[in-house]
Image (spheres, rainbow, N blue to C red):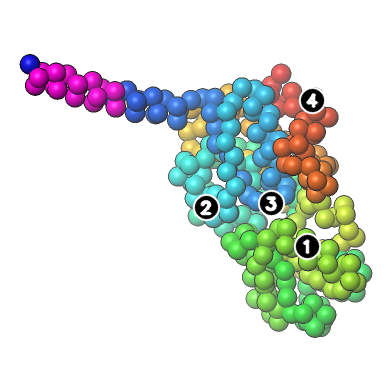
Amino acid sequence: MNRVKVALLMIIAITGIVIGAGCLEALDDDPYQTTIGYLPWAGEIASTNVMKQVLEEAGYEVEIISIEPGALYRGLADGQFDFTTSAWLPHTHGHYMDRFGDDFEEVAVNLEGARIGLVVPQYVTIDSIEEMNDVVDEFDGRIVGIEPGAGIMTATENAIEVYDLEYELVASSGAAMTAEIRSAITNDEWVVVTGWSPHWKFERWELKYLEDPEMVYGGEEYVATLAREGLQEDKPELYEIISRFYWTLDDVESVMLDMEEGYSPEEAAARWIENNPEKVSEWLGE
């Protein structure tokens, strides 16, 4: 009799485990749960937090994960994220698209007019990357970069080679890069950084891009929304919303400026959403 009881308990335990596993799998497939991967750049923090709150308004449970570029594209290809709004194309992240692009989908353009390059204060007396070797000492022989592995860092490594620059590319972060600009301008010093638009720094200080006659940094770029394979079939309503997501440089820079002025990303996103109900309604298909 005891053996029968033990057998029954084992069956119940095994059944419970199977049911539990089934529930976990169902949670993973919930069409109203989603995960967004994004880059730790101010513009991508802005767009991701706006999208998160818009989706939450539509009834979704949203997790956002900040991650470096290589891991973002690899994770999207592996299905670790549903989507990202952080793809800078065709130049900045072009090498990631070449490597992983067959394993996910480019859904839509969400921002136009983006640009990358080398940025200096307006008072710097050179105007082209070709002139940089004439003023190495003024720049202390450094180009201040951002996170290792970022597309703009790869492009800058190429620029150093193409223009035969006698400079060291110093990896840092977006925040450290803007701190270098602030310090240089405060002290009327020269600094050259890896820069991109949109970014609040162009609203705060008088800056300029150095001309790039060899087009190492490419021309104007766009920011795209990418989705993992199968998202349209698995979560069609979510796919439709993210396919309609589109805003302007003025939109994203207003969120970025609020963040720089002390609002949290969540607060800045909420302020923009409150002030732009018509655009949000368009995204939601209302």
Alpha carbon distance from label 3 to label 4: 25 Å
Of callouts 3 and 1, which one flags the residue occurring earlier in the amino acid sequence?
Answer: 3
Query: Which residue in the protein does label 1 denote?
Result: 179
Is residue 9 found left or right of 243 in the rendered image? left
Query: Which residue in the protein does label 3 denote?
Result: 41
For the residue pair 34 and 164, the one nearer the viewer reads as 34
Q: Residue at x 54, y 25 (%)?
A: 32
Residue 59 in view: yes
Q: Where is residue 139 shown, x and y percent of the image?
A: 79, 77
Report the predominant secondary structure element of the magenta stretch: helix
Find numbered disc 4 in the image and state the secondary structure of the residue it sits on.
helix
Residue 71, disc: 2
- Between circles 1 and 2, the one closer to the viewer is 1
- Amino acid type indicated by mark 2: Ala
Of callouts 2 and 4, which one flags the residue occurring earlier in the amino acid sequence?
Answer: 2
Q: Is residue 5 magenta?
A: yes
What span is colored magenta in the figure? 2-17
Label 3 crowd (10 A; few <14 / some 14-19 / many >=20):
some
Q: Residue at x 58, y 23 (%)?
A: 237
Q: Residue at x 68, y 38 (%)?
A: 49
Residue 277, disc: 4
Quadrant of the rendered structure where residue 28 is? top left
- Amino acid type indicated by mark 4: Pro
Alpha carbon distance from label 3 to label 1: 14 Å
Find numbered disc 3 in the image and state the secondary structure of the residue it sits on.
loop
Alpha carbon distance from label 2 to label 4: 34 Å
Q: Quadrant of the N terminus?
A: top left
Residue 244 in view: no
